[in-house]
């Protein structure tokens, strides 16, 4: 039981350490990524207004037997297209408590490929 508590405590500390230096505005929102075992979610957040501007998840994708990493890349591309329609071109990437690796990296690369600037 104590091991699970310490693992969660370390995760929360990593998240707070990462989040302490990131602040999103309307012109340059924060791209926050959440990864569950089955899906991945991303949203553009304005911390100035405390409001979610755009959100997307792998639920929205019509994926036909793609791997989770491929779905994450497609999610980044989808989010970038939605952001371009609203007029957002620059964002600040917030990986949360996750390492910049695997699915998190794929979301960032997908968003960059469609024109979002980090």
Image (cartoon, rainbow, N blue to C red):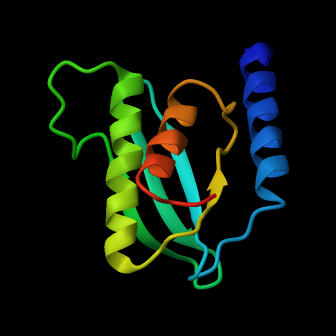
Above-or-below relation of 38 to 83 = above
The image shows residue 13, relative to residue 89, as above or below, that is above
Tell me where residue 3 appears, x and y as whole percent.
Answer: 78, 14
Residue 35 in the image: x percent, y percent? 49, 35
| Residue in the foreground of this view, choosing between 49 and 7 | 49
Q: Indicate left or right for 84 with 24 as reference.
A: left
Residue nearer the viewer, 64 or 38: 64
x, y percentage for residue 29? Answer: 58, 71
Left of 87 or right of it: where is 3? Answer: right
Q: Residue at x 46, y 50 (%)?
A: 111
| Residue 25 figure quarter | bottom right
Q: Quadrant of residue 68?
A: top left
Above or below, 69 against 24 in this view is above
Q: Identify the residue at horizontal 58%, vertical 60% (top origin).
A: 117
How many marks can you see?
Answer: 0
Height in image: 50 above or below 36?
A: below
Q: Position of residue 32 (x, y in %)?
A: 56, 54
On the rendered image, what quadrant is the C terminus found in? bottom right
| 109 or 1, nearer to the observer | 109
- Residue at point 36% right, 78% down? 86
Q: Dividing the image into 4 quarters, which one contains the N terminus?
A: top right
């Amino acid at each position: 039981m104590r091991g699970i508590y310490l693992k969660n405590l370390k995760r929360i500390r990593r998240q707070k350490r990462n989040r302490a230096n990131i602040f999103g505005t309307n012109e340059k929102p924060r791209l926050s990524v959440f990864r569950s075992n089955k899906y991945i979610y991303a949203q553009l957040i304005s911390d100035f207004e405390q409001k979610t501007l755009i959100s997307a998840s792998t639920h929205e994708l019509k994926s036909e037997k793609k791997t989770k990493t491929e779905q994450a890349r497609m999610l980044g591309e989808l989010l970038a297209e939605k952001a371009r329609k609203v007029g957002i071109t620059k964002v600040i990437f917030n990986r949360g408590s996750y390492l910049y690796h695997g699915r998190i990296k794929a979301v960032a690369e997908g968003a960059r490929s469609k024109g979002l600037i980090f």
